[in-house]
Amino acid sequence: MAPHPQDDAYAASIKDPAKFWSRQAKHLIWHKEPTSAFQRTTRKLKSGVSHDSWTWFPGGEISTTYNCIDRHVEAGHGNNRAIIWDSPVTKSKEKISYAQLQEDVATLAGILREEGVKKGDTVLVYMPMIPAALIGILATARIGAIHAVVFGGFSAASLAQRIEASGAKVILTASCGIEGAKGPLPYQPMVRGSVEKSSVKPSKVLVWQREESRWDDIQEEKGERHWQGLMKAAKSKGLKAENVPVKSSDGLYIIYTSGTTGLPKGVLREAGGHAVGLNLSVRYLFGIRGPGDVLFTASDIGWVVGHSYIIYAPLLAGGTTVLFEGKPVGTPDADTFWRILEEHKVNSLFTAPTALRAVRKEDPENKFFEKRGRNGGLKNLRALYLAGERSEPSIVTMYQELLSKHCAKNATVIDNWWSSESGSPMTGLAVLPSTALDFTDHTFHPPLPIKPGSAGKPSPGFDVRVVDDDGKEIQKGSMGNIVLGIPFAPTGFTTLWQDEERFYRSYLKRFDGKWIDTGDAGMIDEDGYVHIMSRADDIINVAAHRLSTGAIEQAITTHPAITEAACVGIPDPMKGHVPFAFIAIADAPKDLLKDLNARIRESIGPIASLGGFIASPGIIPKTRSGKTLRRTLREILENGSQGEFEKDPSYPSTIEDVAVVGKAKEAVKAYFETGEGKKIKAKL
Ligand code: COA
Ligand code: AMP
């Protein structure tokens, strides 16, 4: 395949990261210029281990919110649209200009400061997809505080865990979320319950009142405050706070993500690298160049994709972000996404394959898309970005055909590979030429050809490699562990919040500090395209949400009759996978699935509910040192779901008792040949 500008840009970023990224840093306004773009460092852990590390833009000081909002207003773009809120669940729409956003963010920042929030403090955000959420997040960043946004689908217990881990000083919340067609979901029990459970007690809880379901009695004595009331009072007295710059390496936010154990990992995003890396990616990969360009990221602010491409990146570019409160289907129908594309003249759409599978199920012939396309309503769309889980080739091909027929010239489906740790796509396809790196050339360039099933080629700064279990690089086209060379690109994390030991243990130790372990498995093909095939660890992807099997097992074993369980993912036609449990008991009590799901909902949240289970003694294989062989169980279940009951799974030579594998195979066969399992198999 002939070299493409994306290949040149990538090669330059890996060859000389300092040179490449210092050019990128010039596109932002710094309160204090960094002394260099990048420095290699060494970190010494309490345990005595030293490891190689890196720091981006040392010596620099920056305000991300100044770069997202104020500089555009100062440049005369105050009347441009910053946010379009589209909420089919409340039948509301709102358009917010940069000037208006600046006013609201500065005012709330003033309130937060008066409520005692200082630079470096943590503010926890538990909010639905409404403009106040973005204002709250940006106001926190404006005063140099660190936000920790928690997804609305997590339970009070999970929220409590995150309040404690982040040491949140203040909580920003709302009276309710609106869960698709199900209607309002009051947040009060969740928030009060979590504060009660947590040993860390935030001093204030700001509540955004929504008419759909109000927070009845705001308890001032407990620190609860009426958010809109505070805003009104602050505006009447002209209370505002200016942007507070922070060091490049200071935290902008913490995002909690599932680790292999029950305890979530607090990925810390640093201010300098985040701003520089996102500013490049939103233009170069997502084609949002500035005023007039519209990005619709149909994710949630609780996930990293939402942090980057609903909130920060489109604003850094001075473009418009669409904030969507609804679901791909049922609010009111499978036309919602396409209506938004047409109505708001969206240029780039970013969503998860799960959402498109849900749309395909409701509208298998794409009647809604075709209709809008035929009427010329989708001409502004230049690319459809997919991430969060593997996109099966059939969904990529189907949408590529639709885009080629009805959207902008060269419109492309771009699968891109991400993680909470990376902060921006580690792979993808660029839509602007590499000359755009200097932002001198804003024309669209045909991206590299797509290869359905692959997540594209590495993005600038992400040194993607495939290695064997000893960390040795393996030949092109062979499956292995996907790792990254040091340094991680600027949007990537450099540590976990207040837990450098765990950072080293989780990401560097496995390959002796040489590579960063991504937890994913796959291959790089002859043309340099990266294919992400599955997780290599004990994490499952459910509807593009990352869940810890360890946390689900912990919830299951709170059942008095269950001492041992192993959780793995079972294929699901819409969500990719759903959690499934192997439980080592002889007789399952009546309504066990319902009981277990109630426990999982309480300890994690509804998004982690089990799709099924098998209960039988002696079906959980282990190594001689007692490690559960979930990967072996996963293979048996996957084979069984395809009717391949006799196929042997892989297992290590350290297995304690091979006979257990045989028993698990029999149990899986019995499961899929009768009852619930038979119904599940029929749908696959
Ligand atoms: N607040 C409260 N509850 C939530 C929630 C939220 N923000 N998000 C999900 N839930 C609940 C759901 O209501 C559901 O509860 P139930 O079991 O009581 O019905 C449960 O969690 C499971 O939700 P989900 O896995 O989303 O399944 P679903 O059947 O409700 O919806 C889809 C299916 C495909 C429509 C939905 O999963 C979807 O939109 N997926 C796309 C995900 C996405 O965009 N991810 C982006 C990451 S990059
Ligand atoms: P999260 O940290 O929640 O964003 O989840 C990150 C994980 O989602 C990755 O490590 C992958 O396992 C998976 N993932 C994200 N994007 C893709 C993709 N394009 N293809 C395959 N898997 C993906």
Image (cartoon, grey):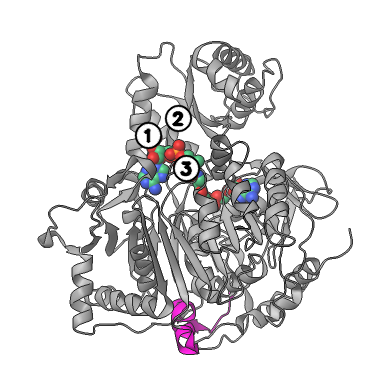
Residue bearing the label numbered 1 = 600
| Range of magenta residues | 56-77
Residue bearing the label numbered 3 = 333
Q: If you read the primary sequence from the N terminus, does the residue marked by circle 1 or circle 2 appear first?
A: 1
Image coordinates of residue 586 in percent, x first then y, are 44, 11
Image coordinates of residue 227 in percent, x first then y, are 23, 66
Element marked by disc 3 = loop
Choose top left, top right, bottom left or bottom right for residue 83.
bottom left
Residue bearing the label numbered 2 = 610
Number of numbered discs visible in the structure rendering: 3
Image coordinates of residue 503 in percent, x first then y, are 52, 57
Labels 2 & 3 near each other (Cβ < 8 A): no
Image coordinates of residue 665 in percent, x first then y, are 62, 16
Q: Can you say whether 511 is above or below 283 in the image? A: above
Q: Is residue 70 magenta?
A: yes
Q: Can you say whether 50 is above or below 404 in the image? A: below
